[in-house]
């Protein structure tokens, strides 16, 4: 398990800053947002802390419950913002697509993490 370091927090803040550069946020428009992150990764945790959300999934806990949260029906109009490992992105996007969400924009790949988003069809 990696400790949270100053360098990791600064890297996370840079990623979060890029996420903040998006146009009008979904929260400002009254839409529901699901943020998916992994609290074991400092950059992902920093991303989650800066992203306004009505729902959140921490992959550190979701793996233990085998993603029970995602197997339930998701709220209508839910958008997804995530910063995860590539392997998690592949699995999560497949399940979210099954529930009627589609990829919105191209995923942005970092050295270890991928920033991706989905919205309703």
Image (cartoon, grey):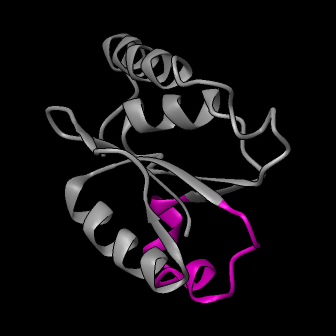
Above or below for 13 versus 51: above
Magenta segment includes 114: no
* Residue 108 location, quadrant: top left
Q: Position of residue 66 (x, y in %)?
A: 46, 84
Q: Quadrant of the C terminus?
A: bottom right
Which residue is located at x 58 percent, y 85 percent? 68
Q: Position of residue 73 (x, y in %)?
A: 69, 86
Q: In the image, is 65 to the left or to the right of 54?
A: left
Q: In the image, is 2 to the left or to the right of 10?
A: left
Q: In the image, is 120 to the left or to the right of 110?
A: right
Q: Residue furthest left?
A: 111
Q: Position of residue 12 (x, y in %)?
A: 41, 22
Residue stretch rendered in magenta on the structure = 58-78
Q: In the image, is 98 to the left or to the right of 48?
A: left
Which residue is located at x 68 percent, y 31 percent? 25
Above or below for 89 versus 47: below
- In this view of the protein, which residue sits in the foreground, 21 or 4? 21
The tally of labels here is: 0
Above or below for 53 versus 100: above
- In this view of the protein, which residue sits in the foreground, 6 or 92? 92
Q: Residue furthest right?
A: 30
Above or below for 49 versus 113: above
Magenta segment includes 73: yes
Which residue is located at x 28 percent, y 45 percent? 107
- In this view of the protein, which residue sits in the foreground, 19 or 43? 19
Q: Position of residue 97 (x, y in %)?
A: 44, 77
Which residue is located at x 71 percent, y 40 percent? 26
């Amino acid at each position: 398990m990696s400790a949270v370091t100053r360098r990791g927090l600064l890297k996370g803040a840079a990623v979060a800053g890029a996420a903040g550069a998006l146009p009008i946020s979904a929260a400002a428009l009254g839409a529901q947002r699901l943020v998916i992150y992994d609290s074991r990764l400092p950059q992902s945790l920093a991303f989650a802390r800066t992203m306004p959300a009505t729902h959140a999934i921490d992959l550190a806990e979701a793996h233990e419950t085998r993603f029970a949260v995602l197997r339930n029906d998701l709220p209508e109009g839910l958008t997804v913002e995530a910063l995860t490992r590539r392997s998690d992105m592949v699995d999560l996007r497949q399940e979210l697509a099954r529930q009627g969400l589609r990829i919105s924009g191209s995923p942005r790949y970092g050295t270890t993490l991928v920033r991706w988003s989905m919205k309703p069809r």
